[in-house]
Image (cartoon, coloured by chain):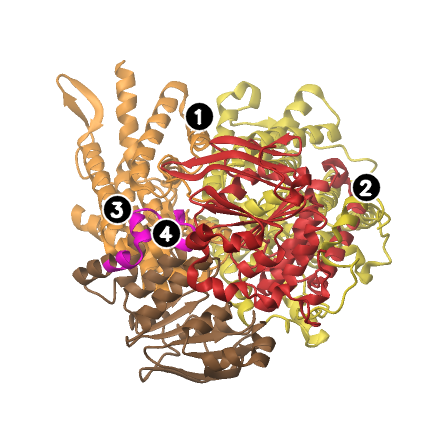
């Protein structure tokens, strides 16, 4: 594996491998020879708007076909797959715009995520067999459990569309987790969240990163700095930097293309998230190490 | 006589309601304490309810006059058709203006088998449903790529294009005259009308049980997810195309079965029985009853059968000329449709649920909705589609505060992902 | 000057805003801050006429805004950039701008104003005849803000302009905003989740919690008040 | 060979009539995102209006203009009284309401005018043109239809592409709230969209009536084929509607001519499926730009 050059410890268990990936839309080269890998730990993917982050996610998910390059997950080659096959492979993705079924209950939304794990066939579903109802009960129980763990168990029977944004994001996360993924793709999980919710989210992502692989697209640098073991920076469809959060922070090219001189000062002092001195806040969440 | 009819249909709907409830809104329906006395296993519970409903239907039909038995039987067959359409259009969100085509296929299949092979009635009807289901799969495949008005256009043409085939090859299909069917022979001293009505109502109940099972299974969940957001559904692992085809096949099978029954009721199967207006009326009745609701299928079927009766008797009362009175039924039907869509988009069942929710909230006191605050209410919740008609009153437990979390142990923390991998079987006793 | 007095808004049994009062002065940016669900978006939607108020008043340059139709308010020079999908995806970039400028400017001024917008936001200029649905998140937000500015509004209501934007773009956006506001007669009300960046460009800040004003002060004072920040802004 | 030429010309003539109604459908869909299943029935009503005027001795062109005016008003009324009240609900609702309207209008026309078909005069001679020494299946009236439809399409195109009114209509069709925030009087534009479509539909009715049996149901089949034409063309594009109309007309003419008239709908269905399999949103639709 050419990309896992041993630079970072976490890449030992890498399972998603992207090699020299190029995507061409009409006149626009959205991705240009991108290589990266993600497995155990949290890998951050940052870059200016339009740098190709969402396109990369869409390729991984099977919405967009690569023009050239290779893409594999474990032993399985990707690139010609359909989106619905993804969760069966052990990859789950949350959407930027939440993507819940607004008129359905929260519980039902979460249960939907278990689709790839459900084994019940159409005949036993039609007959309402014991097998079907048992499986349903099991999925419902697991969904409630996950909702409780994310502190939104009380909303289980409410319609997803009428809930506050922060709650919807947690429901979407629960839906991704119920599929028992080994790799979780998070698409701007922090957008629209308040600073307080951000701290909570950071703790959860860090914790998840100790158990499964997380690939995180995010603009809130305080979150990226707080949770990522490794950060990959895209610009104009190319990887311009890769390293630990601290290395990226000090990289002048990244600062010029993405972070900007004026704001970095404000963001780097993100004591609210990284510090664990604060009893009521994110400190109560166990740190990764 | 009239009062008997009313009680018959109302009871029928009651039985359907219990079947409908778990699947329509909240998936964890088995937890509701109200229903604890019935068997907890859904199959047993549904069978128990169905047996009770079937007995009730038998009782009612035996009290009705032969003419009203015919009408009751028609209600039964339309329930079958509407239940299928409700799955397709109400639940999986695929507009079909061609449901009549599936009925036509079912009717001709049953009639041909009866005339040429003398097959048993049950097998005739099974073949009717099966042939229509095959057509459903054939139509459903291209339909998976279409949406909204495009799909409406395709199904509309389907309803228009199929019947002329029977006219074209009239040596096989009987042309304008159609194919004559023989109604089933009634056992014992039952009259033929009552026996047919019983068969039709029983099959309606059976269909509802099967469809209700499907709707509350993972397939029902997939239908609703595909209706709401295809991209999100696909990412959650739902095979969108397959789900859409399944909905089409189920709907077509129901349509085919209903068509077979319609052939038995009218005694003749001809293309005139399946005009485009039939498809339109089916869609309209489904929506008027309550899209996506299986109880709504009963309301829709009652409307389909009785609206023409009522309007022709109204025309008689108004002493309109024969020419004009023929049009009164259509005018009333269309007007009801328009007014209902504007005033009560959830249909009859949706409106009943709203009343129910209102009464419930008056009785149950406050507490509803205080968690809904400020910004979250902005756009959707205010006008969130009563169209779906699927939700029951929200008896929310007070949400645990969204604020800073109470201290949590490491094990119970975010996602407990490691357990996830291994405990698929450990909590199977559910 | 925008004067909001005792403004209350509710949906059904829910009260979203309760007796909110504050002033916003010309040539300055007034930040409205608070947690999710504090009522910030509702406040903007009420000012632009999308949501009906229960009672209270909101006078802009002496005219009452409440109770007038959305279109009338917009044509009078109130530009509202809503959260998220503010642009019209099916129109091209130029058409988006053209539509916004239709009421405020004559044909020739319109062309000049659009050209000026492309000068300020050169990246948009390269996409001028492309459909807005093809823009990336940051470009969309730039277009939404550019479209609001092209009308030369008297009152600009911005709802979370930094949502989903890269830090550099956010900084650029805020700089453009500060630049356009300073020395102009424009009143800017900026709703932000990102309190830090909002406080850095605004002159005054109003903090909402559960629909009520809990602080209304100079931005510097709000930023300096540790308790207030901890409690309501989460940092 | 002459048979083929005749079928082709007949197909063009029919196709133009489908295109006229398809243009009305496209207009409404583009301006309000609704497919109006009552478009044919509305056209039928306006044509009956013109017919009544003709019976009372009004001149043809006055009746023609009056029918267009009635169509304009009828379209506006339908939007204000019915469609407006459905705002923000599922896309199924307007479908059902326009179907309800179709049923009501046909019922009213049936009750007032009876079910029998009657004649309706054509503006120009309906006998075939003589080219060289052969008479072809294409009349002066067909030429008039062709010209009228092309003009209608061009007007449609100019409205949406080149006028600020069209810009506002497109904007309000896709993003109502945002358009209002930009100062567009969305309500009026939606009404105007329906009114203009009512006018276009009325024109289609006047062009159709002379060539078919004119009864309360005379536009039903035309609506279905016009819908096919509009969907094949992409529902959004005036050029698409014209091309779709042409293709549908030819297809039906060939199928009807060579295979028997009963199979015409089947031919249209096959055409629709083939076209939509190739381009799920119609031949002239623009591809979507972003997935997620």
Q: Is residue C194 left or right of residue A153?
A: left
Q: Secondary structure at mark 4?
A: helix
Q: Nearer the viewer, residue B256 or B195?
A: B256
Q: x, y (%) of residue B274?
A: 54, 36
Q: Secondary structure at mark 1?
A: helix
Q: x, y (%) of residue C22?
A: 44, 84
Assign the N terminus of chain A to one quadrant of the image.
Answer: top right
Q: x, y (%) of residue D280?
A: 45, 36
Which residue is under mark 2? A131
Q: Mark 1, mark 4: which one is toward the viewer?
A: 1
Which residue is under mark 1? D263
Between disc 1 and disc 3, whose residue precedes?
3
Which residue is under mark 3? D156
Q: Which chain wears red? A: A
Q: Which chain wears yellow? A: B
Q: Is residue A221 magenta?
A: no
**Mark 2 and mark 1, same subunit?**
no
Q: Which residues are magenta?
A: C116-139
In three-dimensional space, the C-alpha distance between marks 2 and 1, rounded to whole angstroms, equals 48 Å
Q: Colour in which chain C is shown?
A: brown
Which residue is under mark 4? D112
In three-dimensional space, the C-alpha distance between marks 1 and 3, rounded to whole angstroms, equals 33 Å
In three-dimensional space, the C-alpha distance between marks 2 and 4, rounded to whole angstroms, equals 61 Å
Q: Nearer the viewer, residue B68 or C176?
A: C176
In three-dimensional space, the C-alpha distance between marks 3 and 2, rounded to whole angstroms, equals 59 Å
Q: x, y (%) of residue A116?
A: 69, 41
Q: Mark 2, mark 1: which one is toward the viewer?
A: 2
Assign the C terminus of chain A to one quadrant of the image.
Answer: bottom right
The structure residue drawn at horizontal position 60% and vertical position 67%, both measured from the top left corner, is A271
Q: Mark 3, mark 2: which one is toward the viewer?
A: 2
Observer able to see residue B108 = yes
């Amino acid at each position: 594996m050419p990309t896992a050059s041993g630079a970072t410890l976490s890449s030992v268990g890498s399972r998603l491998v992207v090699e020299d990936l190029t995507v061409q839309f009409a006149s626009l080269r959205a991705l240009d020879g991108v290589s990266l890998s993600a497995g155990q730990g949290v890998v951050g993917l940052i870059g200016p708007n339009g740098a190709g982050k969402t396109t990369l996610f869409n390729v991984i998910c099977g919405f967009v076909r690569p023009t050239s390059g290779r893409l594999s997950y474990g032993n399985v080659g990707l690139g010609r797959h359909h989106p619905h096959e993804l969760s069966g492979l052990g990859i789950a993705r949350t959407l930027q715009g939440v993507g819940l079924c607004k008129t359905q209950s929260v519980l039902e939304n979460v249960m939907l995520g278990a689709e790839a794990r459900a084994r019940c066939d159409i005949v036993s579903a039609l007959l309402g067999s014991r097998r079907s109802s048992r499986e349903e009960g099991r999925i419902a129980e697991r969904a409630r459990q996950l909702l409780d763990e994310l502190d939104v168990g009380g909303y289980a029977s409410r319609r997803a569309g009428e809930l506050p944004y922060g709650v919807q994001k947690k429901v979407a996360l629960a839906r991704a987790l119920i599929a028992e993924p080994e790799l979780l793709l998070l698409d701007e999980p922090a957008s629209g969240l308040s600073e307080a919710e951000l701290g909570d989210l950071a703790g959860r992502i860090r914790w998840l990163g100790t158990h499964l692989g997380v690939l995180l697209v995010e603009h809130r640098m305080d979150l990226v700095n707080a949770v990522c073991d490794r950060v990959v920076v895209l610009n104009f469809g190319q990887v311009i930097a890769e390293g630990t959060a601290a290395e990226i922070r000090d990289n002048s090219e990244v600062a010029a293309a993405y972070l900007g001189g004026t704001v970095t000062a404000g963001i780097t002092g993100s004591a609210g998230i990284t510090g664990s001195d604060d009893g009521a806040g994110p400190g109560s969440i166990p740190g990764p190490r | 006589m009239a009062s008997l009819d009313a009680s018959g249909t109302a009871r029928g709907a009651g039985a359907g309601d219990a079947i409908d409830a778990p699947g329509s809104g909240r998936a964890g329906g088995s937890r509701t304490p109200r229903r604890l006395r019935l068997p907890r296993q859904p199959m047993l519970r549904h069978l128990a309810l169905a047996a009770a409903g079937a007995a009730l239907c038998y009782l009612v039909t035996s009290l009705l006059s032969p003419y009203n038995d015919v009408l009751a039987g028609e209600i039964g067959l339309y329930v079958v058709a509407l239940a299928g359409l409700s799955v397709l259009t109400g639940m999986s969100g695929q507009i079909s203006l061609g449901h009549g085509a599936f009925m036509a296929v079912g009717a001709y299949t049953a009639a041909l088998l009866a005339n040429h092979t003398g097959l048993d009635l049950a097998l005739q009807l099974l073949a009717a449903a099966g042939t229509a289901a095959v057509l459903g799969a054939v139509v459903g495949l291209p339909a998976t790529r279409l949406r909204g008005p495009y799909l409406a256009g395709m199904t509309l043409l389907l309803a228009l294009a199929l019947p002329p085939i029977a006219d074209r090859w009239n040596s096989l299909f009987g042309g304008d005259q159609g194919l004559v069917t023989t109604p089933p022979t009634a056992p014992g001293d039952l009259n033929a009308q009552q026996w047919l009505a019983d068969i039709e109502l029983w099959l309606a109940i059976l269909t509802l049980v099967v469809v209700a099972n499907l709707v509350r299974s993972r397939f029902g969940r997939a239908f609703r997810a595909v209706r709401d957001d295809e991209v999100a559904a696909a990412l959650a692992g739902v095979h969108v195309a397959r789900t859409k085809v399944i909905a089409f096949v189920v709907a077509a099978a129901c349509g085919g079965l209903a068509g077979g029954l319609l052939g038995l009721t009218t005694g003749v199967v001809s293309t005139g029985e399946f005009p485009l207006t039939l498809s339109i009326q089916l869609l309209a009745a489904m929506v008027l009853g309550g899209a996506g609701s299986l109880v709504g299928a009963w309301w829709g079927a009652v409307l389909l059968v009785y609206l023409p009766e009522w309007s022709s008797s109204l025309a008689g009362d108004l002493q309109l000329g024969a020419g004009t009175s023929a049009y009164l039924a259509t005018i009333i039907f269309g007007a009801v449709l328009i007014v209902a869509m504007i005033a009560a988009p959830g249909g009859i069942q949706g409106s009943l649920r709203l009343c129910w929710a209102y009464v419930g909230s008056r009785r149950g006191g406050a507490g509803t909705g205080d968690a809904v605050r400020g910004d979250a209410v902005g756009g959707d919740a205010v006008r969130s589609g009563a169209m779906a008609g699927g939700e029951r009153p929200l008896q929310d437990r007070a949400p645990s505060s969204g604020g800073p979390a109470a201290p949590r142990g490491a094990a119970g923390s975010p996602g407990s992902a490691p357990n996830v991998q291994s405990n698929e079987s450990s909590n199977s006793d559910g | 000057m925008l004067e909001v007095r005792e403004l209350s808004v509710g949906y059904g049994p829910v009260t979203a805003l309760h007796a909110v009062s504050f002033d916003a002065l010309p040539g300055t940016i007034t930040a409205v801050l608070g947690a999710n669900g504090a009522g910030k978006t509702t406040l903007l939607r009420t000012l632009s006429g999308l949501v009906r108020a229960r009672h209270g008043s909101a006078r802009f340059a002496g005219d009452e805004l409440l109770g007038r139709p959305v279109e009338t308010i917009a044509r009078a020079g109130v530009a509202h950039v809503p959260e998220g999908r503010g642009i019209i995806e099916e129109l091209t970039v130029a058409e988006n701008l053209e539509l916004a400028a239709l009421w405020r400017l004559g044909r020739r001024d319109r062309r000049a104003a659009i050209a000026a917008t492309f000068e300020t936001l050169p990246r948009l200029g390269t996409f001028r005849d492309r459909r807005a649905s093809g823009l990336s998140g940051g470009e969309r937000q730039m277009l939404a803000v550019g479209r609001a500015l092209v009308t030369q509004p008297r009152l600009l209501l911005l709802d979370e302009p930094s949502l989903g934007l890269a830090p550099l773009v956010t900084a650029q956006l805020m700089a453009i905003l500060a630049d356009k506001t300073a020395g102009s007669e424009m009143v800017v009300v900026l709703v932000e989740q990102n309190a830090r960046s909002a406080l850095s460009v605004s002159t005054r800040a109003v903090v909402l919690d559960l629909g009520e004003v809990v602080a209304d002060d100079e931005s510097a004072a709000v930023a300096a008040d540790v308790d207030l920040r901890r409690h309501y802004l989460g940092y | 060979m002459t048979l083929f030429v005749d079928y082709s010309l007949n197909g063009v003539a029919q196709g133009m009539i489908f295109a006229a109604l398809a243009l009305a459908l496209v207009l409404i869909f583009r301006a309000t995102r609704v497919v109006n299943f009552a478009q044919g029935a509305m056209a039928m009503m306006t044509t009956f209006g013109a017919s009544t005027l003709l019976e009372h001795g009004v001149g043809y062109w006055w009746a023609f203009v009056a029918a267009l005016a009635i169509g304009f008003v009828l379209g506006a009324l339908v939007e204000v009284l019915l469609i407006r009240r459905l705002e923000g609900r599922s896309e199924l609702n307007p479908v059902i309401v326009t179907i309800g309207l179709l049923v009501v209008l046909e019922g009213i026309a049936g009750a007032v005018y009876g079910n029998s078909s009657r004649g309706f005069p054509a503006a120009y001679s309906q006998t075939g043109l003589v080219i060289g020494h052969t008479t072809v299946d294409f009349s002066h009236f067909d030429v008039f239809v062709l010209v009228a439809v092309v003009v209608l399409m061009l007007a449609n195109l100019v409205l949406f592409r080149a006028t600020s009114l069209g810009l506002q209509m497109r904007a309000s069709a896709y993003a109502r709230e945002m358009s209002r925030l930009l100062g567009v009087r969305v309500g009026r534009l939606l009404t105007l969209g329906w009114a203009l479509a009512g006018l276009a539909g009325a024109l289609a009715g006047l062009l159709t009536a002379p060539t078919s049996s004119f009864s309360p149901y005379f536009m039903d089949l035309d609506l279905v084929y016009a819908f096919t034409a509009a969907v094949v063309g992409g529902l959004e594009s005036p050029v698409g509607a014209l091309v779709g109309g042409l293709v549908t007309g030819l297809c039906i003419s060939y199928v009807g001519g060579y295979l028997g008239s009963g199979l015409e709908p089947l031919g249209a269905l096959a055409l629709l499926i083939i076209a939509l399999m190739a381009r799920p949103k119609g031949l002239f639709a623009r591809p979507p730009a972003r997935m997620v």
